[in-house]
């Protein structure tokens, strides 16, 4: 729904014995949920050739636009802009030519020291074509590659300079690398396809392409894939990780497995814990489709209250990139969701969703539920209140936008016009995900950041020593 946080990007990479273009295109469609503003691929055909543009994968990478592009190795990208504005120049992959060949990069995440690095490079005489932090990474790598043709060295040297969240696929001529930051903020998975090996933001891509998921790229790992296999170049592990909890709560596809935990299972567990921690007297558990579905199933399972689909979702409404006006957003909610009255009328409805960010959409849904005849509407949310900005690749940038800023839980209930609101607790979230707290980023819930962010409280600060 429109006030849900949005992802920065999704990435892919392939090294096959056959042409990879159609597989790459298909793979990007599988991870389209991670970014819907622009798409692109780079493939090696003696030189790196790139096709990219604004729009969905099937629009940008049409059969016509790909007619003259082929190669056995390549990378791909889908993007929603958080750093850098939404315009054609900022589409990815970003490709450059160095003294030792071509370089292309697809990046998911945000670099927290991007401004500092950009200023430094500009003061050294560099000029930039885009406003993205991905270009900063490309420039740093290209600079290193121009001095020494070893791509592993260039990647490691770049990792020493950048701080923050990055899961990347990197192409240096026909060589394909997957790189994950030492905290492991964003996911990156490796899989086997019929004709070679692949990398993707999410493991579901391999299965859709009739391949299989091998494993996650480890935090701080550089993996080179070839048509015959893969080689790992690990760097010393960090004592603490910072996997983004929101990947399991909302962002990733339920059929993906991230760092050993299936997203669907994680959401059901969150729903079960939510029912234990925040019981409600109700006649029916109704999910906000599609984001609240697995959470609601878990809630219904533990509470013993029947689960019903209370809303019809219209999947055919055109996507709306920018909806600055509140009434445009309201209209969009009404177009996308309509209550199934027989499931709601005369009942005490427990409405379950994964998260509340601004609260505008949830308010609209609560009002819709009342208009459909609900006696009471109790909202239950599968993760604690979002209170702080994200600097690691999600578009939640200012505290003012959050429903939970300067509001108690009863005040949030009032804001969204619900009879009650209940959130899963922080310990409940940690328990559901099953990772030690020291391995999760929960900064947007706690305001304590895993890396040094100017003006914010730091949870633990480590330097990368590779
Ligand atoms: S701040 Fe929140 S959304 Fe951003 S990486 Fe951390 S947990 Fe994820």
Image: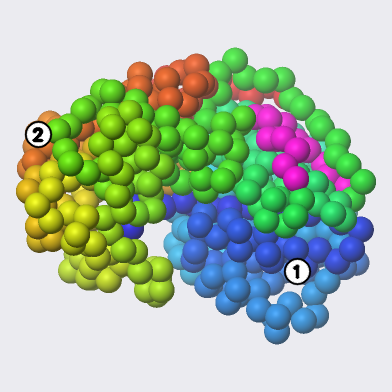
Locate residue 22 relative to residue 289 in the image: left or right. right
Identify the image quadrant of residue 272. Answer: top left
Q: Which residue is mark 2?
A: 410
Q: Is residue 221 magenta?
A: yes
Q: Position of residue 377 (x, y in %)?
A: 13, 45
Front-most of 321 and 317? 317
Q: Which residue is mark 1?
A: 22
Q: Is residue 452 magenta?
A: no
Q: Residues within 10 Å of mark 2 (few under 14, many from 20)?
A: few
Can you see residue 306? yes
Q: Residues within 10 Å of mark 1 (few under 14, many from 20)?
A: few
Instruction: Residue at 63% x, 49% y: name it.
Output: 204
Q: Residue furthest bottom?
A: 64
Can you see residue 134? no
* Colouring chosen for the image of the structure: rainbow
Report the magenta residues as a range: 212-226
Locate residue 228 relative to residue 429 in the image: left or right. right
Query: Of helix, strand and loop, which one carries label 2?
Result: helix
């Amino acid at each position: 729904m429109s006030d849900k946080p949005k992802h920065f990007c999704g990435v892919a990479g392939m090294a096959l014995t056959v042409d990879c273009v159609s597989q790459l295109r298909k793979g990007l469609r599988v991870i389209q949920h991670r970014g819907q503003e622009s798409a692109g691929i780079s493939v090696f055909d003696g030189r790196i050739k790139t096709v990219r543009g604004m729009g969905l994968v099937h629009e940008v990478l049409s059969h016509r636009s790909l007619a003259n592009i082929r190669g056995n190795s390549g990378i791909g990208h889908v993007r929603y802009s958080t750093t850098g504005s939404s315009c054609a120049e900022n589409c990815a992959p970003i490709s450059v030519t160095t003294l030792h060949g071509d370089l292309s990069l697809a990046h998911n995440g945000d670099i927290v020291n991007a401004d500092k690095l950009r200023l430094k490079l500009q003061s050294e005489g560099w000029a930039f074509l885009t406003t993205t932090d991905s270009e900063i990474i490309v420039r740093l790598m290209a600079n290193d590659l121009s001095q020494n043709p070893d791509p592993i060295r260039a990647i490691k040297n770049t990792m020493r300079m950048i701080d923050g969240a990055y899961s990347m696929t990197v192409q240096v001529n026909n060589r394909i690398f997957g790189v994950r930051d030492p905290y492991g903020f964003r996911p990156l998975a490796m899989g086997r396809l019929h004709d070679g090996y692949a990398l993707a933001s999410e493991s579901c891509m391999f299965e859709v392409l009739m391949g299989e998921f091998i494993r996650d790229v480890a935090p701080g790992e550089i993996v080179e894939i070839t048509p015959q296999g893969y080689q790992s170049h690990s760097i010393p592990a960090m004592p603490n990780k910072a996997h983004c909890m929101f990947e399991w709560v909302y962002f990733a596809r339920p059929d993906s497995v991230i760092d050993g935990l299936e997203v669907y299972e994680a959401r059901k567990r969150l729903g079960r814990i939510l029912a234990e921690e925040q019981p409600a007297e109700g006649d029916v558990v109704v999910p906000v489709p599609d984001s609240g579905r697995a959470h609601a199933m878990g809630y219904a399972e533990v509470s013993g209250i029947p689960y019903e689909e209370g809303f019809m979702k219209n999947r055919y409404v055109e996507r709306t990139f920018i909806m600055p006006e509140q009434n445009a957003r309201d209209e969009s909610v009404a177009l996308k969701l309509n209550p199934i009255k027989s499931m709601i009328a005369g009942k005490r409805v427990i409405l379950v969703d994964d998260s509340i960010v601004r609260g505008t959409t949830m308010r609209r849904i609560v009002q819709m539920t009342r208009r459909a005849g609900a006696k009471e509407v109790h909202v239950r949310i599968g993760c604690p209140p979002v209170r702080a900005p994200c600097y690691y690749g999600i578009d939640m940038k200012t505290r003012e936008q959050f429903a939970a800023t300067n509001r108690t839980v009863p005040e949030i209930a009032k804001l969204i016009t619900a009879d009650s609101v209940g959130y899963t607790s922080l310990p409940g979230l940690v328990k559901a995900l099953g990772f030690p707290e020291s391995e999760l980023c929960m900064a947007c819930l706690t305001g304590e950041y895993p890396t040094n962010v100017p003006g914010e409280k730091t949870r633990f600060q480590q330097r990368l020593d590779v």
